[in-house]
Amino acid sequence: MNLDDYTYCGFRRIVCAVPDLKIADVRHNINAMTGIIDANPDADIILFPELSVTGYSCADLFGQNLLLNDSLKGLASICDHLHKRHSDSLPSPLVVAGAPIEFRNRLFNCAILIYDGEIKGIVPKTYIPNYSEYYEQRWFASASDLPAGSCININSADRELPGRHDSLAISSRIIPIGTDLLFRFNGMTIGAEICEDLWVPQPPSGTMSMAGADVILNLSASNETIGKHRYRRDLIRQQSARCRCVYAYASAGAGESSTDLAFSGYSAIAEDGAILAESGRFLDNGQSTVADVDLQKIAFDRRHTNTFRTPLCHGSQEFRIIEIPAVGLPAQHNTARDTSCRLSGRTVEPHPFVPADPSRRNDNCTEIVDIQCHGLRQRLKAIGCKSLVIGVSGGLDSTLALLVACRTFDIMRMPRNGIKAITMPGLATTSKTRNNAWHLMELLGVSSLEIPIGAAVAQHFNDIGQDPHCHDAAFENSQARERTQILMDYANRCGGIVLGTGDLSELALGWCTYNGDHMSMYAVNASVPKTLVKHLVEWFAEREENKEISRVLIDIVNTPISPELVPCDDDADTIAQRTEDLVGPYELHDFFLYHTLRYGESPRKILILAREAFAGVYTDEVLLKWLRNFYRRFFSQQFKRSCMPDGPKVGSVCLSPRGDWRMPSDASAAAWMNELNDL
């Protein structure tokens, strides 16, 4: 990934750093912190823990003038260090450090935001814990004691800042202080809260996010007790989901451990409900947790979720916005990003619909099948129907639909012979798929019927003047529509409904015959993508007690995906049509679909993400070829989706025109194709 791609994709690099500090030894701590700054030249933000300049565990030493003076000197040293980096044409990240700040005869536990040699703002801690092992109210006041709009001139405060007084903002300008501060920097809107602020019923970050903050920084000093780590991790992850934001958390390290408390140095970076990167615990020396966060993803989710809105009602909190002009951004000086194609701290999953973790995949499969079964059950109950008609081809989709139908009838305590399964061999049906279809129907105990369509299709060809040797769209679609006619009419005869078998991937590509396999009375697979269909059939096979059923299911999984509409000239039992040779690999199309619908990504960004996900598997030329085909088909085939039948929604990506995707059937793909042409 080159620099332009990185910027275009909306990525920003955050480093949560836990320095190897010593309690009350400011000089040592500052050296450790500036060392981390120099070691991360490509960071956009470097976040340090709570009271990192002095150490959190100083206790009554916070009342000592010497320590407070040293703390101010330490902040001046960080400013000076960053200013010198800029003077030397080195990148200067936004540094967020923790330090005690005295203001109006009270001491505040603060986050200090520093950029390019200047303190841009100070955010004090709001909730000051004073229970169990915490005794912070002995030393610190709450930010709620500050009037809105407060500013501080540290040089003219009660204590004079020793040392140089030239261009350092700590000694030369009025600095805003308060919890009403948001910072705009390098395309981010940043809010800060401190440790306990996250643990309360209404964290400040909630209000900050509603006011526009998409990155929340938490400086923390959270000690370890049994079970606390899991709860804390869930808090971080859930707050990032609730606020639809990036939530970066840096906590005090082992150097803070003293007297009765032990600190582990846990850090984490979460994005919209997912932990991107996290550190180990109880590690020696300084450590850094790094992640490239995706601000475009955050922006899409906020636009898409219409309940996430900035409050406009009277009395809502107003924030001061601190603009931080980006000077000498890390990416402008660092070449590491220009040569590396990998993102830091995040993995682009090649199969976003299929969890990589086996236990999570099992849970998802269980839940999806439950949704399918209970959706179908309700449809049958609502219309008082006790009969289903389904076409079984020996392929993945019809197999999954049949398995769901059987489970649904079992749940409803109805005999499986109410399922009328019909296999309809045609002009290109192979013995392999035909035998698998017939064998599976018999093993599952459903009513089985075979109705060959060859003669009916031949008559139809004669009626419309179709050359049977011309294997065009009419040749293929006549077979698909003949099968659907049989299913519909048979359903009328037995008082049942036709169960659709087509999947989400086919709907996205329009890989279905209009008023053929495109149509049914209830489409049970309509929101299940092809890559997931395969895993669901495997899931059934793994749990099937009948070994012969399991064997047939695995054989179906291993059969090439094909509509079997065009015969092979050389061997009638050879599958001539392989769907993925014609439209492209389903794993790519499912990847394209997910990122198009779930996050509204542009073709350029999808190509960039696909390079990451499929590195070493597909070349850029192959990715671009099938991405172009995806957009061409996705736009041109919307008319099929505009009148698709009902089907249960199982995931966050769905193409139902009544729910998730309302697209004009005649929309132009020009803008998307133009961007592809420019790549």
Image: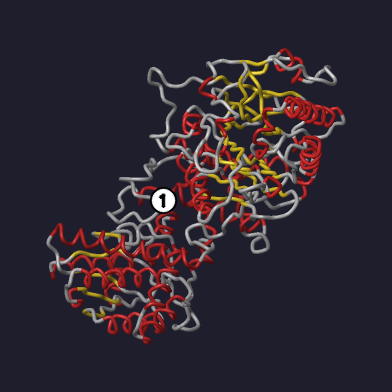
Q: Residue at x 53, y 60 (%)?
A: 351
Query: Disc 1 residue type?
Result: Ser
User: In the figure, residue 671 lies in which quadrant?
Assistant: top right
Give coordinates of residue 560: x percent, y percent: 48, 74
User: In the figure, residue 646 lies in which quadrant?
Assistant: bottom left
Dot 1 lies on which element?
A: loop
Considering every residue shown, the one lying at the far bottom of the view is: 548
- Seen in the picture, residue 420 relative to 264 is either above or below; the reply is below
Q: Nearer the viewer, residue 38 or 365?
A: 38
Whether residue 342 is visible here, answered yes or no, is: yes
Q: Quadrant of the C terminus?
A: top right
Q: Nearer the viewer, residue 213 or 670?
A: 213
Give coordinates of residue 494: x percent, y percent: 13, 70
Classify residue 607 as left or right of residue 489.
right
Whether residue 632 is visible here, answered yes or no, is: no
Give coordinates of residue 38: x percent, y percent: 81, 40
Q: Residue at x 46, y 21 (%)?
A: 317
Give coordinates of residue 617: x percent, y percent: 64, 64
- In this figure, which residue is indicated by the disc labeled 1? 652
Q: Residue at x 30, y 72 (%)?
A: 402
Q: Nearer the viewer, residue 461 or 268?
A: 268
